[in-house]
Amino acid sequence: MQKYILKVDEEHLTDAMLQQLIRYMPEPEQLARLEQFKDQYNELAEAEQFAVTMSSIKKLVPRLKSISFKMKFQELVQDIKPVRYVAATAACEEVKTSKKFCLILQIILLIGNYMNAGSRNEQAVGFEISLLTKLNSTKAADHKTTLLHYLAEIVENKYPDALNFAEELMHVDRAARVSAEQIQKNLSQMKKSVKQLETDLKNFRPHNEEDRFADVMASFLTEASAQYEILENMFKQMEKLYEDLSVYYAFDPKKYASDEFFTDIKTFKDMFQEAHKDNVHQREMEEKMRRAKEAKEKAEKEKQERLAKKKQLIDISSGEDQEGVMDSLLEALKPVLRFPTNLGVKHLLEGGSEKSPAESKSVKKQYIFP
């Protein structure tokens, strides 16, 4: 173990192993006392032998912490990776410059002033962004339709081009997951570790010829310092853009964290899209019901017409002569029979056709009851 630590051998060392050593290693005073027993090494217990061996390395715990910092550095960079900065900075620009989102906010303000007419809140010049998430709390008499549904309907009917305003806020979702507070903590920890490593290297004295701590860690310090400077500058830029955004929307950036701000906008964006889908679904259901009603009314009308025809047949007077009865029957069955229109009933009954027997036979075959 001592050899691995002196060589900074990352193939055999793990961060979990280093953390265990840092946690359970005796205090420097105790290590100094244990070193006195190195001449009695073979007589000591295994745990004591390990402690005596490790106690010979000067400033052991600071060395272990520096090696641990090196091993965790890439993970730390990933936690505050540039991709998150890009998402947050891009989201700041999108929310500030999106014309469609600006139009949506103006419509909300107009609706709010209309609803508050006559109250002390009428003619407001603005509202807090956090109120966007509460638009679905104001409901109509049916307790289903909300102010958000009404807003979506207005936008669809009057400003359809603004329906897809979410497409101009592409980075908002990722920005909602970027915690400026957590990034600040990680950067502070990184800065502290870099400064500590600088101090350790300045005061470093090699343990023996195999001690490669200075060579390995000096190279790492150069890389870590450069990475820290880049990340810190990106964070400052992100903070500046968010401060500008806070001025534009008139809120206190210290009280309204960036991740909360973008989460509220994301929530509103998602709720608006859902409300629009509800409106479309409601219209489709109403249209379906309208068509079903029309079909039912049509079927009922046809049924009544059939009943009327049937009643007409039943009500034919039995006292009429044969020609009158037949005329009534034919009139009632006009949609069913397919006699030629140029042949009168009387003409057929009297057999008055001048056609040949073959032609008459053809007529009888063609014009029959179903």
Image (cartoon, rainbow, N blue to C red):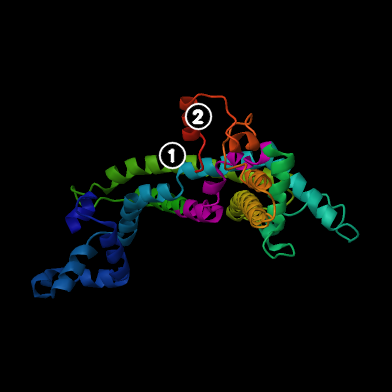
Q: Is residue 323 visible?
A: yes
The residue at the far right in this view is 118
In the displayed structure, does residue 366 sit left or right of residue 142?
A: left
Queried whether the magenta region covers residue 185, the answer comes back as yes
Residue 303 position, x and y percent, is 62, 54
The amino acid pointed to by label 1 is Ala
Determine whether label 1 and label 2 are within 8 Å by CB: no
Disc 1 residue crowd, few under 14, some 14–19, many 20+, Cα 10 Å: few
> In which image quadrant can residue 15 be found?
bottom left
Queried whether the magenta region covers residue 104, the answer comes back as no
Viewer-proximal residue among 291 and 127: 291
The residue singled out by tag 1 in the image is 226
Q: Nearer the viewer, mark 1 or mark 2?
A: 2
In the displayed structure, does residue 364 sit left or right of residue 264?
A: left
Residue at 74% of width from left, 62% of height from top?
A: 140
Residue at 64% of width from left, 41% of height from top?
A: 165
In the displayed structure, does residue 240 sit left or right of residue 369?
A: right
Disc 2 residue crowd, few under 14, some 14–19, many 20+, Cα 10 Å: some
Residues rendered magenta in the picture: 161-189
Identify the secondary structure beneath mark 1. helix
Residue 356 position, x and y percent, is 50, 24
Estimate the spatial distance between the alpha carbons at disc 1 and disc 2, rounded to whole Å.
110 Å
Q: In what quadrant of the picture does the N terminus appear?
A: bottom left
Count of numbered circles in the view: 2
Viewer-proximal residue among 309 and 240: 309
